[in-house]
């Protein structure tokens, strides 16, 4: 290991780069980022943390190990662009590699722990990786200059080749990588100016597309091992129930079924292939002990949440004395409720495990490889270093793979199986036995004077994800994620009070794409439309009047409105005679987005979104094609949620089980989506989740405009907006 970065270079801790001995022959560049001490109270482990690495091999291959996980969002391409840009190599010369589980060395500068989520990858890694590429290039040039005994300033680089114009000599990076690794790194690094960019800001093709198109990409669910068995599982249909008794006879009679594994809370069938395992599971006669949650009912869950929202709350933000100003005058008040939601990614929960010789090897796709390692170790009662995690690309995460319950269950099953076993959940099990987006209650109150809001009170009530996922981040009774989007708003709303009430039920909760801003921004944007309607003000004009201090927010709002033709009538639609146009704005994840939705509503209350226009200011952009794709994908996620999405309980059981009753948007329901990006020099923002967040209130507001009915509990209820209802 090379000397400590500060001692070796004197560079500040913000983004220290250093060269050291290669993992194999070649040049290795490490990056150190600051630890977010404000986000966790746990002690920082001893030693240095090198969060990303570039390796340049003698054969010119450039490999970088990125702690962020690729789950469809395109980060391996965008981050490879950052490295290739500063290193002066072609994008297709860079190979992206998954990071192994290592909380100390690959902890996110945002989360501290090793995790991919929260639309943070570009914000966290683009700058450091650019510096890593620039440092590597400078050291390679220095090595070539020493070999030729010329001034380094006389050398140029292009496509992985160093050239000396006066003598006509050239040399490949790989030929000087070993020599470069023995040099001291430069103390100052100059990054390229935007005018010099060849790759950053350009719509480059994704580096993972060819293998995906050819079927070569191996996801966790694709992993095959010699002698592997296959299993599927079932837990109690009643949340938290236990196994009572199991009659295995009919399952063991199914040809190909090898074994039934009975644990206290689940039953698994092991067979020669997954289909046979599923047939064996269906043949089991299981009696469950439902436990204390057999009476869990959705109506009661809503009632309990409503009661909890009456307070008192913990103050998350206070400016002035909002309660005093809300005692009289033109005071408006409304509450908005959002249901439990499942992630339902294309790739169901799966994990391949081999427990042997006192250790364990795992093949899966996870957003938290460190958590997966410690979870597996705890399940087996062994040290984490005895667990090897082989991470794979993920076929959709959306927060589901921030949880490791699937890994833990697979490990517990594998402990009873001789040889490697792949455990695959059915779609029904994946929807009914996961951790859900919390049930949220958002209560808002505002006072208006002379057409402007002068006092604002926002109370968020719901389960805390942070409290179980990262306990040190749950401080003083406040879940920072749950109030995200409520504590920092783009609007000037006068005196402000934001409160949080933690309310837990028996239902386990997890992050879901869009996280806390899904609730807080949805409620705020719908509430603004309600106030605008009751005061006879155009919703766009009402918002514009409160955005003097946030020009980026005003910019995206104006752009979306202009491109959507705000102020003109929504065009006729064959899907319904009642037409409406709604607008919404969001500021979260370091980005500003505005959306305008056109909807048509039938007499029966069916809602069809016919057009969606989104304007985005995400700061600097690495790859505009990936940016647009992420906005579109997020919008579809939001469309599905606001139109159809809900998980509900009856008799302690989840009522939904597959895409027939847990609906997602279908291809014939897809609206035209237009994305307009505002050129910006601001710092990088996130984009994986904002499209989901801003789409939902825009659609709800469009339905309000079309029907005159503001729905306050999602998803949109057909019966409440049916004509004559």
Image: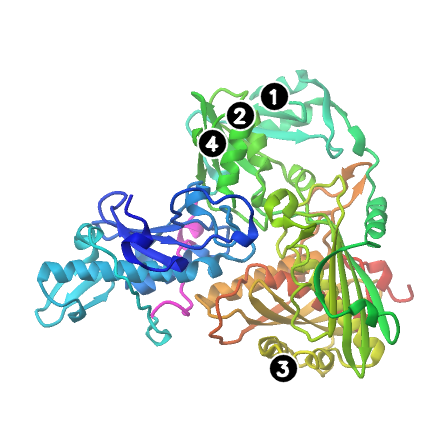
Spatial CA span between label 3 and label 1: 61 Å
Give residue 721's quadrant in the image. Answer: bottom right
Residue 127 position in % (x across, y down)? 41, 62
Label 2, label 1: how far apart the Cα atoms are: 16 Å
Q: 35 left or right of 703?
A: left
| Residue that sits furthest to the top in the current view | 249
Indicate which label's residue lies in the foreground, 3 or 4: 4
Residue at point 58% right, 47% down? 346
Residue 562 disc label: 3
Note whether residue 600 is visible: no
Mark 1 or 4, which is nearer the eye?
A: 4
Residue depth check, mark 2 versus mark 3: number of the one nearer the observer: 2
The Cα atoms of the two marked residues, 3 and 4, are separated by 55 Å
User: Which structural element holds mark 3?
Assistant: helix
Q: Which residue is mark 1?
A: 261
Q: Which residue is mark 2?
A: 380
Q: Nearer the viewer, residue 296 or 193?
A: 193
**Circle 2/circle 1 CB separation < 8 Å:** no
The dot on residue 678 is none
Q: Which mark is residue 384?
A: 4
In the image shown, does 651 or 440 lie closer to the viewer? 440
Task: Look at the magenta stretch and give its main secondary structure.
Answer: loop
**Mark 3 or 1, nearer chain start:** 1
Part of the protein shown in magenta: 198-218
Using the numbered discs, state the Cα–Cα distance from disc 1 to disc 4 in whole angstroms: 25 Å
């Amino acid at each position: 290991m090379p000397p400590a970065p500060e001692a070796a270079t004197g560079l500040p801790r913000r983004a220290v780069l250093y060269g050291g001995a290669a993992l194999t022959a070649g040049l290795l560049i490490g990056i150190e980022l600051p630890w977010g001490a404000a986000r966790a109270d746990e002690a920082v482990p001893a030693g240095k943390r090198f969060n990303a690495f570039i390796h340049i091999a003698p054969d010119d291959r450039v490999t970088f190990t990125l702690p962020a996980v690729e789950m469809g969002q395109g980060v391996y391409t965008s981050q490879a662009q950052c490295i290739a840009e500063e290193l002066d190599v072609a994008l297709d010369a860079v190979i992206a590699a998954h990071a192994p589980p290592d909380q100390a060395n690959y902890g996110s500068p945002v989360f501290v722990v090793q995790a991919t989520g929260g639309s943070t990858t570009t914000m966290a890694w683009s700058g450091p990786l650019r510096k890593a590429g620039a440092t590597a290039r400078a050291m390679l040039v220095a090595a070539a200059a020493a070999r030729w005994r010329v001034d380094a300033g006389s050398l140029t680089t292009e496509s992985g080749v160093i050239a000396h114009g006066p003598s006509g000599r050239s040399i490949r990076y790989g030929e000087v990588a070993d020599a470069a690794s023995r040099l001291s790194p430069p103390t100052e690094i100059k990054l390229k100016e935007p005018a010099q960019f060849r790759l950053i800001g350009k719509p480059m093709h994704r580096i993972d597309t060819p293998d995906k198109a050819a079927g070569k990409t191996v996801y966790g669910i694709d992993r095959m091992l010699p002698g592997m068995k296959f299993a599927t599982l079932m837990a109690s249909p009643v949340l938290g129930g236990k196994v009572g008794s199991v009659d295995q006879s009919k399952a063991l009679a199914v040809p190909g079924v090898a074994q039934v594994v009975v644990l206290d809370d689940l039953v698994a069938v092991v067979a020669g292939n997954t289909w046979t395992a599923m047939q064996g599971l269906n043949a089991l006669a299981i009696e469950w002990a439902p436990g204390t949650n057999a009476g869990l009912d959705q109506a009661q869950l809503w009632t309990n949440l409503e009661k909890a929202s009456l307070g008192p709350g913990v103050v998350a933000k206070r400016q002035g004395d909002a309660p005093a100003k809300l005692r009289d005058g033109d005071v408006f008040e409304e509450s908005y409720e959002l249901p439990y939601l499942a992630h339902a990614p294309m790739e169901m929960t799966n994990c391949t495990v081999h427990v042997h010789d006192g250790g364990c090897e795992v093949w899966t796709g996870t957003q938290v490889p460190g958590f997966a390692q410690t979870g597996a170790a705890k399940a087996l009662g062994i040290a984490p270093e005895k667990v090897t995690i082989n991470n794979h690309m993920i076929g959709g995460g959306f927060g589901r793979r921030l949880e490791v319950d699937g890994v833990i269950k697979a490990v517990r099953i594998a402990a009873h199986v001789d040889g490697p076993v792949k455990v695959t959940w059915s779609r029904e099990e994946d929807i009914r036995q996961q951790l859900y987006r919390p049930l949220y209650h958002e209560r808002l109150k505002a006072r208006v004077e002379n057409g402007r809001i002068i006092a604002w009170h926002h109370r968020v009530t719901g389960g805390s994800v942070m409290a179980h996922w990262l306990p040190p981040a749950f401080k003083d009774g406040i879940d920072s994620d749950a109030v995200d989007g409520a504590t920092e708003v783009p609007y000037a709303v006068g005196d402000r009070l934001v409160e949080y009430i933690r309310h837990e039920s028996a239902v386990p909760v997890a992050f879901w794409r869009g996280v806390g801003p899904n609730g807080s921004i949805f409620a705020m944007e719908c509430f603004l439309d309600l106030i605008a309607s009751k005061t006879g003000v155009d919703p766009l004009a009402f918002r514009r009047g409160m955005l003097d201090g946030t020009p980026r927010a005003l910019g995206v709002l104006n752009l979306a409105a202009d491109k959507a033709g705000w102020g003109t009538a929504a065009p006729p639609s064959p899907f319904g005679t009642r037409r409406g146009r709604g607008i919404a704005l969001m500021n979260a994840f370091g980005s500003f987005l505005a959306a305008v939705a056109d909807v048509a509503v039938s007499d029966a209350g069916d809602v069809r979104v016919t057009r969606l226009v989104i304007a985005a200011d995400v700061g600097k952009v690495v790859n505009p094609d990936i940016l647009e794709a992420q906005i579109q994908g997020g919008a579809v996620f939001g469309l599905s949620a606001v139109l159809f999405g809900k998980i509900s309980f009856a008799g302690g059981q989840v009522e939904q089980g597959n895409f027939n009753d847990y609906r997602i948007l279908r291809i014939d329901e897809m609206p035209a989506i237009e994305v307009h990006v505002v050129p910006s020099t601001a710092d990088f923002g996130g984009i994986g989740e904002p499209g989901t967040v801003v789409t939902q209130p825009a659609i709800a507001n469009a339905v309000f405009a079309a029907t005159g009915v503001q729905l306050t509990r999602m998803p949109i209820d057909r019966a409440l907006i049916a004509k004559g209802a």
